[in-house]
Image (cartoon, helix red, strand yellow):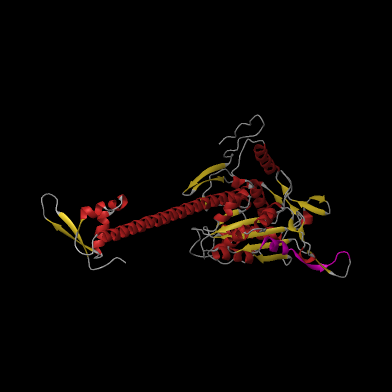
């Protein structure tokens, strides 16, 4: 695959880039990176066969997942969220395009009930325990997620009173059922989804209230979160619906099921030998107002690739799908977290390639989810249409039956109490609509014993006469 020529602006068309191959499966297509040696990868659940053996930490995570019969990719993404939550908030990705951004990370685990979402989180907790200064909280409102960073502490001005202020900078959030997240997000005035969107891009959090004990403002960049949400495929569609606001674009998506889990489970490997990086060891330091920032080093080739792709978009030469709006940033965050997992403070080309594999399987998982949600929606719409059609048919049938009953009563009234009435004469006394229903109505009246019918032979058509029966219409 050869590189494309640059256009008049010096920007290549963003098609399948060199070093990638097209991969097709039953659900669709994704772009999967070739390994560094240029040989075609054997794909295993979206990552190359050598992905897990590329690093000691990755092999450790796979063994831990297989020891408990859970999907390695699900456990890995939760571990990365815990790395993000445990890393100093002062560590940032450089402003390659736009503004500097923190490492806060959001991931969504997809699986039917009882197939490993919660246990994947528990396995990751055993592999990478949180530090004491990291808040560990279940789901809640947007205000609750921000409140996790706050507490009562001594007034910094030396006054002998407690004040409600930010006392920590790191938090890990696990939301066991994504439906609760989307339902909370739909409520009028809810702040949960906007808070998660802001967390991903490291903007300011919280709200200022008149009450001293409810004042919650966290300046931009003064926090690091890891957020994991467990979804059933049938409930994840609500989060996809929020794509105009930008929520699903800020998540990686991973299937918590895996057909390649071995039947023979390996031994439990124990926790990872990992500790948060020392921010003071980073060479590049920025003083931003009253805050000191430590900037992760990123390989220049990665910087160039991101800048070229971004330039193509801002010049209108390339257009990303709405769901891919933050793809480069997500890939860079994944690469940085993989580097930190390996106890490094620089993002190199190997991190970038490993991150691309994770992001591609995330894209494929999300694409399958989009198809699943659309199929379910079409099935629900079809079922609703069928139900409404049956209801309409039943209503028409009931109306038709009512008209037949009323016409039968009218026929009965046209027959004298004593004696007979000619069928033809009775029919002529009815309205046009009733005449159209005459035979059905007469059959109904005779079946109910309201009338009896008698035919007398004659020349041509037999003469039909009616008499009242033993029963009267109610």
Percent coordinates x, y for residue 83 in the rendering:
68, 59
Q: From what the image shows, is residue 298 above or below residue 119? A: above
Q: From what the image shows, is residue 328 above or below residue 163? A: above
Q: Residue at x 65, y 64 (%)?
A: 140
* Residue stretch in magenta: 141-157
Q: From what the image shows, is residue 145 above or below residue 435? A: below
Is residue 46 shown to the viewer in this render? no
**Furthest residue to the right?**
158
Look at the image and tell me in which quarter the C terminus lies.
bottom left
Percent coordinates x, y for residue 168 in the rendering:
76, 63
Percent coordinates x, y for residue 134 in the rendering:
72, 64
Corner quadrant of residue 379: bottom left
Q: Of residues 437 and 160, which is closer to you in this image?
A: 437
- In this rendering, position of residue 360 left or right of residue 420: right
Q: Is residue 404 magenta?
A: no
Q: Residue at x 37, y 55 (%)?
A: 396
Is residue 193 shown to the viewer in this render? yes
Q: Of residues 465 and 340, which is closer to you in this image?
A: 465
Q: Residue at x 74, y 63 (%)?
A: 149
- In this rendering, position of residue 115 left or right of residue 449: right
Look at the image and tell me in which quarter the N terminus lies.
top right
- In this rendering, position of residue 409 left or right of residue 323: left
Q: Residue at x 29, y 65 (%)?
A: 473
């Amino acid at each position: 695959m050869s590189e494309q020529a640059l256009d008049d602006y010096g920007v290549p068309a963003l098609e399948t880039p060199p070093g990638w191959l097209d991969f097709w499966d039953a659900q669709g297509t994704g772009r999967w990176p070739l390994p560094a040696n240029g040989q075609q990868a054997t794909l295993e659940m979206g990552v190359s066969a050598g992905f897990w053996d590329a690093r000691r930490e990755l092999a450790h995570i796979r063994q831990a997942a297989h020891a408990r019969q859970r999907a390695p990719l699900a456990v890995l993404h939760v571990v990365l969220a815990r790395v993000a939550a445990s890393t100093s908030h002062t560590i940032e990705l450089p402003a390659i395009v736009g503004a500097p951004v923190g490492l806060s990370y959001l991931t969504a685990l997809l699986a039917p009930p009882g197939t490993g979402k919660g246990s994947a989180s528990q396995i990751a907790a055993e592999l990478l325990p949180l530090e004491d200064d990291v808040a560990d909280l279940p789901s809640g409102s947007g205000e609750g997620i921000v409140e996790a960073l706050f507490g009562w502490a001594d007034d910094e001005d030396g006054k002998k009173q407690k004040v409600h202020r930010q006392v920590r900078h790191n938090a890990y959030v696990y939301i066991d059922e994504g439906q609760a997240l989307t339902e909370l997000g739909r409520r009028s005035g809810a702040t949960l989804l906007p808070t998660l969107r802001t967390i991903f891009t490291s903007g300011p959090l919280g709200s200022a209230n008149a009450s001293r004990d409810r004042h919650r403002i966290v300046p931009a960049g003064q926090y690091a979160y890891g957020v994991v949400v467990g979804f059933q495929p049938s409930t994840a569609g609500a989060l996809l619906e929020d794509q105009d606001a930008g929520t699903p674009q800020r998540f990686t998506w991973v299937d918590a099921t895996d057909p390649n889990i071995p039947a023979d489970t390996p031994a439990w490997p124990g926790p990872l030998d990992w500790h948060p990086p020392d921010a003071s060891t980073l060479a590049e330091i920025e003083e931003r107002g009253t805050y000191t920032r430590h900037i992760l080093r990123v390989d220049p080739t990665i910087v160039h690739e991101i800048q070229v792709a971004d330039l193509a978009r801002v010049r209108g030469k390339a257009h990303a799908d709405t769901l891919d709006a933050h793809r480069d940033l997500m890939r860079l965050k994944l690469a940085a977290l993989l580097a930190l997992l390996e106890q490094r403070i620089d993002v190199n080309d190997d991190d970038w390639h490993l991150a691309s594999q994770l992001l591609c399987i995330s894209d494929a998982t999300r694409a399958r989810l989009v198809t699943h949600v659309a199929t379910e929606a079409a099935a629900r719409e079809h079922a609703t249409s069928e139900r409404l059609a049956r209801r309409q048919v039943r209503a028409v049938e009931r109306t038709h039956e009512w008209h037949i009953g009323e016409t039968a009563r009218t026929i009965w009234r046209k027959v004298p109490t004593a004696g007979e009435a000619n069928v033809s004469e009775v029919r002529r006394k009815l309205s046009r609509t009733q005449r159209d229903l005459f035979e059905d109505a007469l059959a109904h009246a005779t079946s109910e014993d309201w009338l009896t019918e008698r035919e007398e032979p004659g020349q041509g058509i037999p003469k039909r006469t009616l008499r009242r029966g033993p029963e009267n219409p109610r």
